[in-house]
Image (tube, grey):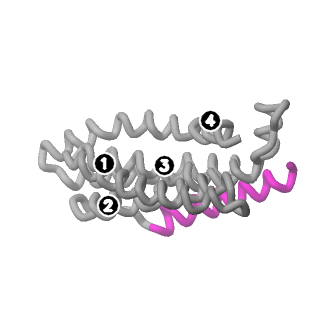
């Protein structure tokens, strides 16, 4: 069940990964020219675009998780709740791609590694505790993945923002896309 969910989760992430692959040389070029303002602008724009792509994908996937699984896996469509919960991980994995691209462009390649080790250790402990609980079971793997990705994101974002000031307006770059994606999700939910 978890394997099916992982496959579906990685589809929108692949789009963000391709986008972020182009981000690293762009940021590196601006920094090599000592133009941190251009680097910050490019990184802020990339963050915004990632949010515009991943929020509707995540909310849409969460809302129609059952029909998606029934369509792709008609013989074994269970796991809709698991897929819906996994979309939170999908959001943070995508944002981590952007933040890590910025850190790589800055030459801070060890920060994502260290943060992932910290997140991985916490994920391992949470997996042991949560999965062994019969009331939580396989959902524990998803919950621990969410916690891991949030920790990795927070560490990397704080370090990145310390070195290059991002111009992220909460209202325009996060709140409005979240509201729009929520309205889209409500509209889709109504017809599912």
Q: Nearer the viewer, residue 113 or 172?
A: 113
Q: Residue at x 69, y 48 (%)?
A: 83
Q: Residue at x 44, y 60 (%)?
A: 122
The part of the chain drawn in magenta is: 170-192
Residue 73, position as x, y percentages in the image: 78, 32
Tell me whether circle 2 and circle 3 mark residues in contact (CB < 8 Å).
no
Residue with the mark numbered 4: 7
Closest to the camera, between mark 2 and mark 1, is 1
Q: Earlier in the sequence, mark 3 or mark 1?
A: 3
Residue with the mark numbered 2: 166
Residue 180, by quadrant, is: bottom right
**Badge 1 element:** helix
- Give the CA distance from mark 3 to mark 1: 14 Å
Residue with the mark numbered 1: 113
Residue with the mark numbered 3: 93
The residue at the far bottom in this view is 171
Q: Residue at x 87, y 50 (%)?
A: 191
**Badge 3 element:** helix
Q: Is residue 157 toward the left or the right of residue 12 in the image? A: left
Tell me whether circle 2 and circle 1 mark residues in contact (CB < 8 Å).
no
Q: Is residue 102 toward the left or the right of residue 185 in the image? A: left
- Give the CA distance from mark 2 to mark 3: 19 Å
- Give the CA distance from mark 2 to mark 4: 32 Å
- Give the CA distance from mark 1 to mark 4: 24 Å
Q: Is residue 55 toward the left or the right of residue 157 in the image? A: right
| Crowd rating for badge 2 (residues with CA inside 10 Å; few <14, some 14–19, many 20+) | some
Q: Residue at x 57, y 38 (%)?
A: 10
């Amino acid at each position: 069940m978890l394997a099916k969910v992982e496959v579906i989760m990685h589809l929108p992430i692949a789009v963000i990964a391709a986008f972020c692959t182009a981000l690293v040389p762009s940021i590196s070029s601006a920094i090599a020219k000592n133009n941190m303002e251009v680097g910050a602008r490019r990184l802020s724009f990339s963050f915004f675009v990632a949010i515009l792509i991943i929020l509707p994908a995540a909310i849409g996937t969460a809302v129609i998780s059952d029909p998606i699984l029934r369509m792709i896996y008609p013989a074994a469509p269970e796991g809709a709740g698991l897929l819906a919960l996994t979309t939170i991980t999908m959001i943070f994995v995508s944002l981590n791609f952007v933040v890590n691209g910025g850190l790589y462009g800055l030459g801070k390649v060890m920060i994502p590694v260290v943060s992932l080790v910290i997140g991985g250790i916490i994920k391992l402990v949470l997996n042991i505790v949560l999965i062994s609980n019969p009331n939580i079971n396989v959902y524990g793997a998803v919950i621990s993945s969410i916690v891991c990705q949030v920790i990795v994101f927070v560490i990397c974002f704080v370090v990145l923002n310390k070195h290059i000031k991002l111009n992220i307006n909460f209202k325009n770059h996060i709140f409005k896309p979240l509201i729009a994606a929520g309205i889209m999700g409500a509209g889709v939910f109504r017809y599912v």
